[in-house]
Image (spheres, rainbow, N blue to C red):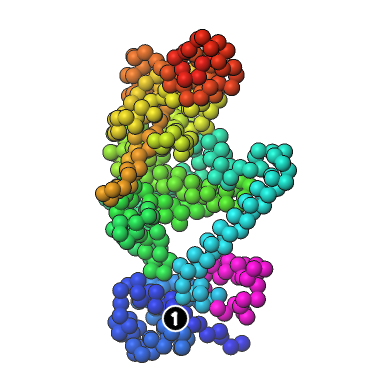
Amino acid sequence: MAERKIFAGPKVRRIRNALALTQTAMAEALEISPSYLNLIERNQRPLTVQLLLKLASVYRVDLEELRGPTGGSLDQLKEIFVDPLLSGELPGDQELVEVAEAAPNAASGMIKLYRAYREQAARLSDLTALMVAEGHAPVAAGRLPLDEVRETLERRSGYFGRIETAAEAFAATLPGGLDLAAGLKDWLRSERGIAVRVLPVHVMPDLRRRFDRHSMRLFISERLSQADRAHEISIVAATLALLPAIDAELADLSLSSAEARRIARFELARIAALALAMPYEAFLSAAKATRYDIDILRARFGVSFGHAAARLAMLQRPGAAAIPFFLIEIDAAGHRLRRAGAQGFPQARFGGGCPKLNIHAAFLQPGQILAETVVMPDGASFLTVARTLEGPSVEFGERVRRTAILIGCDAALGEGVVYGQAMALDPVTIGPACRLCERRGCLSRAEPPVTRPLGLDEMVAGLSAFDFQ
């Protein structure tokens, strides 16, 4: 049987461009003429066995990568053009092979666009079904995939054992003597052929990071702080190195749609990045030694305040657990961005929707740590710590993106936390949320309770904007 000829011109060109080589320089290293290399790059000549071996020895190229286009991209492109909307557009698969080989970024963009189109079509179909049912369909049917992911992660523990174990093992293989970002850059370059580069704002104005599959470079925005840059690099490294552990944890979440699973994979990659930056045993030991002082922990591990706080809410390994913290993050308008907990977010006991919480006051004192004890109507008490988080740097004229995070625990455990000093002050009485709170005379009330009638006596005016008896 005749051996199949290998035409891999675009891949050879990408290798040369990634190394910033001219055709003359590469041809000299491969011991061929520049004109012959030019023919190879234009797919007018196949790669010989001798050239394949030379490429492998000189540039450490994986020969399997030169045998054909990336299977995943090609298969997904074929799936797109099987769709009735596009069927008949192509006489065969050769053009798809050429696109997958010569323009991997364009192929990836086509795949993303088609995926968004299919998911949007499914969402509109669900909405149509709800309208036909005249509102009698269950509310859950209209839930967005993001809502499903958030609710799933909020209900369960923040500890993901397989990710933690894989992250510790991977962190142990990184070069010693380097900080996390430097170690991961070295690993990405040596093991995956990916170079990391920081781009100025005018080149990448609206992205935190972007991976260019064509040049095998990971671009990071200069808007980000050093800690946030390291976190973005960690996410990419975790996605590549810890994918089996991430996929195993993802399977356990039992999500209902491809979009929900994709969103959850992003969230699990962020969790894995935190596990890489703050390995479990080392971080737990430091947390206990500092009595959970977040500022000291973030300085010691080179992370942000938000990352260190989020990591505290994950430390529940059986036999080696920390105080079970929970956290909330909101924006200045009060929109909830995330909720998590070492044992799941305590929605029933804590609520987290009261305007009197110090997380709202934090916006009035940016960068300051606010600690206090809060008491619920049923007598349950919690130690809460709040602080603002700064977003990416902005250009003149742009509005600063600032959020606030609250991390808390049962007040009974507060003596073991450095912020427990706040327990000497009078506690603040709060409710789960205004709609569920029946406390009268609350100056912070934003909504009336659903359990009480309003305005029973027009001759009586209370302190609240909503008078009830």
Task: Report whether residue 385 is seen.
Answer: no
* Location of residue 187 in the rendering, given as x and y in whole percent from the top left corner: 36, 58
Q: Nearer the viewer, residue 166 or 425?
A: 425
Look at 52% across and 49% down and name the residue there: 263
Q: Is residue 250 magenta?
A: no
Q: Quadrant of residue 407?
A: top left
Is residue 184 shown above or below 68?
above
Q: Is residue 84 magenta?
A: yes
Look at 45% across and 44% down and name the residue there: 271
Q: Which residue is mark 1?
A: 9
Q: Which residues are magenta?
A: 68-95
Look at 49% across and 38% down and name the residue there: 159
* Location of residue 47 in the rendering, given as x and y in whole percent from the top left corner: 46, 84
Is residue 207 shown above or below 277?
below
Q: Quadrant of residue 369?
A: top left
Q: Nearer the viewer, residue 465 or 177?
A: 465
